[in-house]
Amino acid sequence: MSQDATLAQAPAQAPMTHKEILEALSGLLIAMFVAILSSTVVTNALPTIVSDLHGTQTGYTWVLVATMLAMTATTPIWGKLADQFSKKLLMQISLVVYVSGSALAGLAQSMTWLIGARVITGLGVGGVMALIQIIIGSMVSPRERGRYSGYIGATYGLATLLGPLVGGVIVDSTLGWRGCFYVSLPFAILSLIVLQAKLHLPTVKQEVKIDFLGATLLMGGVSILLIWVSLGGQQFAWASATTVYMVAGGLIVLALAALVEGKVAAQPIIPLQLFKDRTIALATIAAIFVGVALLTATTFLSEYFQDSRGMSPTNAGLMSLSMVAGLMGTSIISGRMISSTGRWKVWLSWGMLAVVVGTALLATMDHSTPLWLIGLFMFILGGGLGATQQNLVLSVQNNVDQANIGAASSVVAFFRTLGGAIGVSAFGAVLSHRVAAQVADGIAPLVRTGQVTLQQAKALGGGDVPALSSLPAPLRNLYEVAFGGATGHIFLFAVPCTVVALIAVLFIRETRLRTTLDKIEEPEVALDLAAELQVGGALEGAK
């Protein structure tokens, strides 16, 4: 989007019928199912994968961070291209990229290989997730969008629910963890076929100038800071020259990215002028911290159930039922109510409050917290996330025209994914550090009293993610206690993030959801202004 991109207008488009929308939506929902499944199906398998590939807790974190970093860096590019090329073709390309990355991940022989393959997967998933919101925004007016957001929420919840369950079953079966990377490929192929047959949208033809310099600087700055956060305290001390160099370097690169985006690039990847709009600016801030809460919960709770409560991957997947139930319920209900009433801020506000409460409650858990109580905490958090995720995007799309909906939608997706990547990286480092410290403190007494041998102690103290079933009971209990307490600790760090998101949401100004696809002056608003002028004239005459 160039500096005068707000003047761009999309060509006139006849409204799609309900049947046409549902037919096209079916292909989009399958694609969304694939994208969500790619993350959730691997979550429960990761402890086994990292153990088999002799990885560390840092490696565990980077398998996830690498995917999110690729999603984050490329989401604005997909949004930019969506404003200039065929949205259907871009969606199909992103699905092909995803399939390629998943196939390579299933063949991984080392952690380095796996992380590289997950980067490719992230490129494709980033396109799918960004383009879904953009395409739906091009098919349905903001007022009617809630009618269909229930389907989106249900699909999101279904993929979130089935992913851990399917992943757990695959890992526990003869297929092994490699099967997790292939389970969603048939769905991706089906989505390609449905989209080709049923999705028909006009293409806005504009001169293409992709801001590769801005994208490179943005990705470089974020990567440097994420590497610093994930390795600090382990590979080097927090208070060290390496920390100074990495933090300073990351901030300088990001400052250069901001300079390029604001002053140099003709069509910046992230148009800074978008943030002059109060709703977009506040929704972006909220999206960052919603991403922190969402990714922290989906990433570390699964690991908690396996490494602190001794569950199998399948049972750990079952524990996600409560959070998914809350997410699906509020997503469907809020979507219907918004379409019916046109009021959306109340759902954002109460949803964000539920996120704060749910995160704070999860911060109280440890290795001995009753599972039913954790399930209740997860239900509250899931309910809050279901009422906020889609509606943050809706509030932004309502404030831009069709020609620029791709850039605006991708900005929200970009910052939500960025928040999640930062959260997972930072909290993964905190988790790893606390577990290692508590294990180191607890091993010495066990060795001294003869409960474990020095050789057994070295197997746990080497930094690798252990296979708990192979550890003697005292070491297994030590690790479970340490991991349970550390998991609660990272949710404590997430609480201030959710509070900031709540404050941002409360200051968003609610505007009437338009009933047209493109942004035009509402007749009601014009009438209100005319009436105001008439009243003012009457008062002046009376004087």
Image (cartoon, helix red, strand yellow):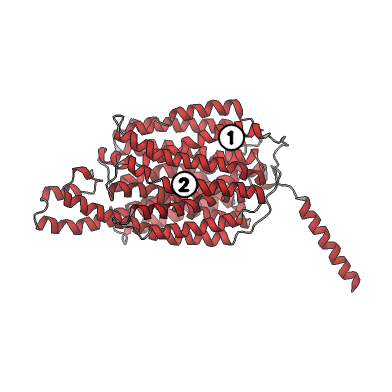
The residue indicated by pointer 1 is 25
Is 11 situated left or right of 447 in this image?
right
SS at badge 2: helix
Q: In the image, is 90 to the left or to the right of 64?
A: right
Tell me if mark 1 has few (under 14), some (14-19) or many (20+) residues whose alpha carbon lies within 10 angstroms of its own. many
Residue 210 visible within the image: no
Q: Position of residue 121 (x, y in %)?
A: 43, 36
Q: Amino acid at mark 2?
A: Ala
Q: Is residue 268 above or below residue 179?
A: below
For this orientation, the residue located farthest to the bottom is: 543
- Expressed as whole percent of the image width and height from the top left, the position of residue 236 reads 28, 55
Q: Residue at x 9, y 58 (%)?
A: 449
Q: Position of residue 99 (x, y in %)?
A: 44, 30
Badge 1 element: helix
Give 94 or 132, whichever is nearer the viewer: 132
Res. 535 visible in picture: yes
Q: For marks 1 and 2, give the CA distance.
A: 22 Å
Residue 393 tag number:
none
* Residue found at the very far right of the displayed protein: 541
Q: Amino acid at mark 1?
A: Leu
Q: Which residue is mark 2?
A: 325
